Amino acid sequence: QVQLVESGGGLVQPGGSLRLSCAASRSISLLYAMGWYRQAPGKQRELVATFTSDSRTNYAASVEGRFTISRDNAKNTVYLQMNSLKPEDTAVYYCNAQTLLRQSYWGQGTQVTVSS
């Protein structure tokens, strides 16, 4: 089992930046994949950015070039650096981890609000 704790959300003006963190309860280097998803009110949860154990990354087209996913294996933490934020980025952001057996775990989510 993997416990995930997100932090770093908040209120930011359009064009601003935030960095989300996701701390895992076990070594992330042993996981198949980790990533960030988001869910806006009235919408389905969608992929934001992920990376797999072979270091491949995948970004949603809407965030490509603005968001960057990274990890610190020593801290068992995954980050999402979000720049040039737009109001449409407003959502609850969830961290996800998949084990080698493809078991999926979610964090509790952190709210990101982009508004002037």
Image: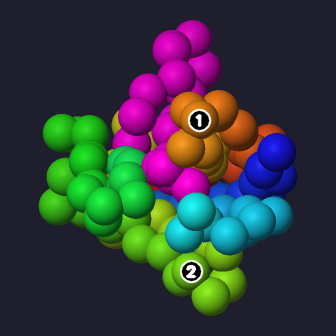
Any mark on residue 101, and which?
A: 1
Residue at the (18%, 39%) spot, across then down? 61
Tag 1 near tag 2, CB within 8 Å? no
Q: How many marks overall?
A: 2
Give the x, y percent position of residue 62.
Answer: 23, 40
Mark whose residue sits in front, 1 or 2: 1
Q: Is disc 1 placed on a helix, strand or loop?
A: loop
Amino acid type at mark 2: Asn
Q: In front here: 73 or 92? A: 73
Q: In front here: 2 or 67? A: 2
| Residue 44 appears anywhere in the view | yes
Give the x, y percent position of residue 34.
Answer: 51, 52
Instruction: Give the magenta range.
Output: 31-48
What's the image's color scheme?
rainbow
Q: Is residue 57 left or right of residue 111?
A: left
Any mark on residue 73, and which?
A: 2
Q: In front here: 104 or 70? A: 104
Any mark on residue 81, and which?
A: none
Amino acid type at mark 1: Leu
Give the x, y percent position of residue 87.
Answer: 41, 43
Residue farthest to the front? 101
Q: CA distance from mark 1 to mark 2?
A: 20 Å
Q: In front here: 105 or 85? A: 105
Residue farthest to the bottom? 74
Q: Is residue 39 above or below residue 61?
A: above
Q: Is residue 70 above or below residue 44?
A: below
Q: Is disc 2 placed on a helix, strand or loop?
A: helix
Quarter of image, res 21: bottom right
Does residue 79 belong to the magenta stretch?
Answer: no
Residue at the (55%, 44%) spot, across then down? 100
Residue at the (49%, 74%) spot, across then down? 71
Quarter of image, res 98: top right
